[in-house]
Amino acid sequence: MKKKIAILGSTGSIGENTLQIIKKDKKNFEITLLSTNKNLTKILKQAKEFKVKNILISDLKTYRNAKLKLNKSNLKIYNDFNNLKKIFKKKNDFIMSSITGLNGLEPTLKTIRFTKRILIANKEAIICGWNLIDKELKKYNTKFIPVDSEHFSIWSLLQNNKTQNIDKIYITASGGPFLKLPLNKFSRISIKNALNHPNWKMGKKISIDSATMMNKLFEIIEAKNIFNLEYKKIFALIHPKSYVHAIIKFKNGITKILIHETSMKIPIFNALYYNDLNKKISSKEIDINILNNLNFSKPNTKRFKALKFIKMLPKKISLFETILITANDEIVKLFLKNKISFREIVPTIHKIIKSKDFKKFKKIMPKNLDNITELSKFVRFKIQSIVYKSS
């Protein structure tokens, strides 16, 4: 029997990698839904290639154009995740949730009930709304697999073990393109320089987050939420080759590490074929040269100031994380528009999250999706006044 899968964000990098894996095993998969924001050309090509009957286009203008263009097509086109009952008659085996940004939280929450397993590659959803996600997972008895390479590695290493047995977790970071750049040259960093990641092919936003190390701060928050750990047990470790993705030291003295080449296909493949030992992915041989020179080091917080924000984070999930995510999102946009310099990114975020307007949110847990989306809008509004007033 074919495994049913819906892919949210199918035109993004995670969605495309998922489809490339499925392409080699079409006889065993049925894609029930593809979704995109605006990339009509690509999603139509995907729907045709994989014989998908349902697509969802979030952008209203693109959706209307698609309805006009395809009015005689048998393809069913939707614009709203409230229509999922019309699409899914039975539970999917998998849903891949890979819509980027906070826009991915609502679809994640709404699709959990329609799948046996949800694979989440959306860090903003996990950081800002994990308590809401966890509630839905328990309510609908849906299994969760994290797809981000670091968290998938932790999840894999924890099989047949319990989080209370963890002594420490180390999440690795490449250090990005400026690991060895002298600090006095940070003022000359261009957008092109910042986007030039040494190991991974990523979108613009995540590439900048890697360069500032904000992405590693976010991954620490994700790990705390997913595995119900204290921050004092989670550490970032510089590993320029990006070969080791996670290390867990257990209380019994055993330490486990997980390695794989820098390809997101590997965690996606293993999530899709969980417990299926007969499936094989094409991968490179173990690189002995890298193993003999793993070159770990502790991150220098003078270089990667974003990691200092860990001390500002509340112990329990709160709306403060929404402020942090939104502030970073907006400030990175300003950098990519050449409105601020690279070295101003982290200090500007720090200025925003320290604002007296946001202090109270450290003690408020998100009760619903509206709490998060309304606060995010408020933060974006405040940033306009804080940033542009000082510029």
Image (cartoon, rainbow, N blue to C red):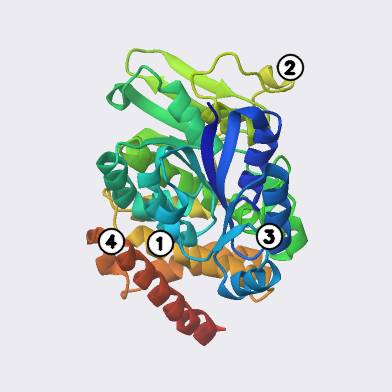
Give the residue at x 66% y 40%. Answer: 19
Instruction: Quote the CA–CA distance across marks 3 and 2.
Output: 37 Å
The numbered mark, 2 or 4, whose residue comes first in the sequence reads 2
> Element under label 3?
helix
**Amino acid carrying mark 3 in the image:** Phe
Direction right: furthest residue:
192
The label on residue 186 is 3
Task: Tell me which label, 1 or 4, sits earlier in the chain.
Answer: 1
Is residue 243 visible in this depiction of the protein?
no
Q: Earlier in the sequence, mark 2 or mark 1?
A: 1
Nearest to the eye among marks 3 and 2: give it.
Answer: 2
Question: Where is residue 89 drawn, in percent x and y?
Answer: 42, 45
Give whichever of 35, 385 is nearer the camera: 35
The residue to which callout 2 is attached is 285
> Which mark is on residue 82?
1
Q: Secondary structure at mark 2?
A: loop
CB atoms of marks 3 and 2 within 8 Å: no
Residue 8 marker: none
Q: Nearer the viewer, mark 1 or mark 3?
A: 1
Kindly indicate the quadrant of the structure image that contains residue 363. Answer: bottom left
In percent of width and height, residue 133 lies at 34, 48
Q: Secondary structure at mark 4?
A: loop
Instruction: Give amino acid for label 4.
Output: Asn
